[in-house]
Amino acid sequence: MNLNFNRRHFLKTATAGAALAFTPQLARKAFAASPLTMQAAWINDAEFCGYFTAMAEGDYESAGLDLTYLPGGPDVIPESSIISGKADLALTTPDTTIKAIVDQGAPFKIIGAQYQKNPIGIVSLAKAPINSPEELKGKTLAVPPVNVMSVEAMLKLNGVDAAEVNIVPYAYDPTPLIKGEIDASLDFTTNVPYTIEQQGEKAVSFLLYDFGYKTYNDTVVVTEDVLANKRPELVAWLKASRAGWNENFVDPAVWPPKFADTWFKGTGRTIENEIFFNTAQKPLMEHPDGIFAMDEAGVAANVETLNSIGIKATPDMFDTSLLAEIQA
Amino acid sequence: MNGSGNRAATLVLLVALIVIWEIAGQLQLVAGGTLPAPSAILARIFVDRADYWPHVLATLRTSAAGFVIGNAIAILAAICFCVWPFSERLMRGVNIAIFAVPPIALVPVLVIALDGEVARITLAALLVYFPTMTATLSGLNDIDPRTADLISAYGGGRFRALRMVRLRAAVPAMMSGFQVAAPAAVLGAILAEFGSGARWGLGTYLLGSLGRAEPDRLWGIGVTATAIAGVGYGLAALVARMTTGVNRAVTMAPEPPQAGDAEHRMRSIAMTIAAIAFPFLVWQALLVISQLSPIIAKTPLGVVDYLFFSNASAVAQQKLLAALAETIPITIGGMFLGLAIAFVLALIAFAAPTIMNALLPFALITQTMPLVALTPLAVLIFGRGVAVTLVITVSVTFFAAFVVLAQGFALIPRAAFDLVDAYGANTVKKLWLVAIPASRNWLFVAARLAMPKALLGVMIAEWLATGRGLGNLLNQSRGYLDYGMIWTVALVSVLVAVALYQLTYAVDRMTRPR
Amino acid sequence: MQGLPLVFENVAKAFRIKGQALPVIERLSLDCPSGSFTALLGPSGCGKSTLLRLALGLEDAEAGAVTVGDEQPRAARRTGRVGVAFQDAALLPWRTVESNILVPFEVLGSPPPSAERMRELIKLVGLTGFEKARPGELSGGMRQRVAIARSLATEPRLLLMDEPFGALDLILRRQMNLELQRIWSQSRPTTLLITHGVDEAVYLADRVVVLSQRPARIVADVTIPFERPRPADLHRAPEFHELCDEIGSYLDHSADGADS
């Protein structure tokens, strides 16, 4: 299936062309900084701290990019943003992206991975801890409907019959877990334990990744079309973003407070929460080859995991050539 | 009875209810303290006050724009439908689709097709449209037929009658529409902010706060949203009260002569076919205009292809049928329950306005507090079974039906009550002999508002709490970018809603007294 | 200014209820010449009001023709030369008495009556002091009088009245009858008055037409010989009573006969 550019994209291009033709100053500026739009996966929180740092440090500007940052949300399907031409690249979950490639023929390529280890995991209270898939038997587990397949796959990989776990929908709020209405929930392990501790409970968690469900998360996805037409910009973005993340991880407690009145203002979350998140995600993102790396073993693990839940992933869906360019 | 005495009684009752809530909150009586005390909510709003302003301003702007635009379109549409009744039949499918399409299916498409703020205003306007359009149309049509005759008798056409009689006569009904529309606009703005990645807005604030397990913050946001909606509701209610007294018919209008089967059968069939086909044409046209990728945007034929001729169709059909089997029965139960509760509330509003005025702020909270914020509380109290589904369904359905019914009771001519008063009838007798028969038409208007919403309520409960049925299927499909299934579920839910809507029409016609 | 003649020629009309045709009027002809005053009497539900609605073009005849002057009813009513008072006052509840009287002028787009003429009209129907009252604040009789003032306000050449005095007490009714006669005599519009009151019909009309039960046929057509102006005490004259009795017997007969 071919990608249809929407009219907005066309207009944007046409306007840019007109600007180039008629206004020399603008033309120079446009030449100096290529516009690039990224679609984040969620609203502003520490998950995207590295990009904020890169912007604050001017990394994108010095890489020749004029970056537009779009926050995500529950109804923003990042892949949709790049199909519709609203954004050039998006941070996605690899299972949905690859499922869209396989089932819908969506022309996507994964060009990097923010999280080497997917931060989603099973969170439970320390007073009734659940430390392994085995212990989920007979328990009530809240899972966002999107992730039910992943959880069922993880259970299968560990020899647990999914029918033995009572899976109910999870709607963003950990209150039912804290009040004991459910025994565990699937959430970002980088985040929810902090909330639970704020409510005077201790949390334990384990990653799905550590029990055989080895996927990346916040994979950097572009359409084949953008990959062909904006390759230099994408490489520049990977390089600048990596610089931002590296700076951010020098001390995970330094940057979040600096965004208290900008990116994190009025988000309903505290800066302490963001520092906790930022600290917790560091080991999930770091890789000897640098942030976003997708080594052969990692890609192979993703492909194998996704195939185990019936999503026919292949290694060619991961394009590591851009990363290779910034490695050099 | 005197006015100031009633107001005092209302105030006492309202304070009493708040005190009960306060005690329940302080002693953590409800769901292990998940329901915070009013004082805790207010204290939390005070603590968070610096955060609130930009969010409140954004929500105000979006909901006000949606309210104005949605109502303007609704009133214009109602006028067209009144002047050219065939246009109402042609648009009926589109109207119900707008009303019945679940926001959880709609928002992702809006977010893709439109720019951020435009998408949010559009959702608010879409939620506003149907209640105002329905109420206004029934107000325009439900006039004393003799006054329209008078205009005709002096050579006035339908536009003259529209200007001199119908528009003015419709004001109270229009206002009852606005009363439903005000919370709907706020809810629409918040839902869109919540989903669309808006930087500011109470919905954004809610989303950021959800994961923090702080009910006092969530309730603070809900109460703030209710206050915004309350202003709109209050203004509309004020205008409604000022106009209703004057508008009240002086005597009961006789049943208008039957128009007769003037319409030719062939024309009638053609009209029905057109009415069914029209929404699909609009659907196709919107997709052509928006130029969305065919991966995202499924055309009517695309859905048929997906459901019947694609590789996935067998699985899709099986999933869909299983989901429908879970969703439909509880929808029917929920809609009767919601309607019954609306009726009881309208009776209370009629027989004991003092009590109703005190209950109203709490009713309004259920309309503007996004369900996603209430779900933990609902789940903790009612579990994850049929009960929680019914509770959520009722909370979605009752309000619009209640407002319409209360307005219907208020418009009953005084003379009708004077008659039964003369025989010493008590309030119950008054209701039984006059109010209930006289509000019959309004009951059906209320039912038409409640029916499609009931399906929506069940789907929301399935999505948030029970993880079953059509709502869950829709949410899962969203996660897997299974656009074929997303559009199929949206289409099926609209079709079910249309079927229920037409059912009320049929029952209305069958039971209409001659 | 001449009164507009009103002619019903072989008119038929039926209503459909649950798909079944219910004939209301069958082949009825009635000629109201220019400047005549015709009263229609008949049992309830016999189709009197339907005749009036046909004359106004509010309903279309299924057969035959209705002519006002030399025009179709729909064309005639636009000229402003047709006045109507409905059985129920049909006032707009949000308008004042004065403003309700102005409705026909607004619809016709003709200049409103002078303040003096308005005062006169309101005085004529005995509502002086109630100019700014709304219908909800008036009694049933007062509302009907507003409707009468409204029907007269445009100085119509054809006046159609459907039981305009129905809600008035006897004294007021006689008083209004007297006034109506006076106004009518001044300008002599062609008048069709639907009424239940035999004495009212005899007192006001040149001619009383008695209709049968549905479907309406003319069972009697009685010319009223009394000279105008007719004094108030005509009501006590023996020949008045004789005529009333005669017409009353036609009416009784028409009510009996219909069922057989």
Image (cartoon, rainbow, N blue to C red):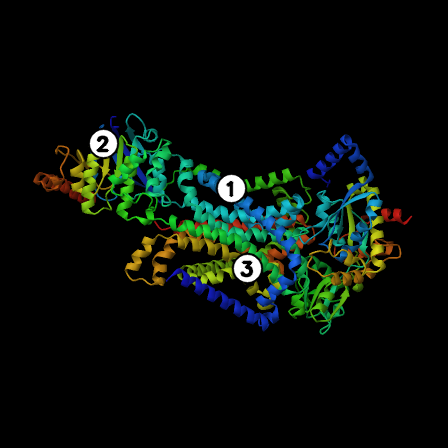
Tag 3's secondary structure?
A: helix
Q: Do the residues labelled 3 and 2 touch (CB within 8 Å)?
A: no
Q: In this view, does A103 lie to the left or right of B430?
A: right
Q: Nearer the viewer, residue B263 or A61?
A: A61
Q: In this view, does C165 lie to the left or right of B263?
A: left
Q: Distance between the residues labelled 3 and 1?
A: 32 Å
Residue shown at 21%/33% (left/top)? C184
Residue B365 tag number: 3
Badges 1 and 2, same chain = no
Tag 2's secondary structure?
A: strand
- Residue tagged 2: C30
Q: In this view, does C111 lie to the left or right of A289?
A: left
Q: Which of C115 and B167 is in front in this view?
A: C115
- Residue tagged 1: B91
For mark 3, name the chain.
Answer: B
For mark 2, name the chain.
Answer: C
Residue A253 seen by the camera? yes
Q: Identify which amino acid the numbered label 1 is placed on.
A: Met
Q: How far apart are marks 1 and 2 (CA)?
A: 46 Å
Badges 3 and 2, same chain = no
Q: In this view, does B496 lie to the left or right of B482?
A: left
Q: Identify which amino acid the numbered label 2 is placed on.
A: Leu
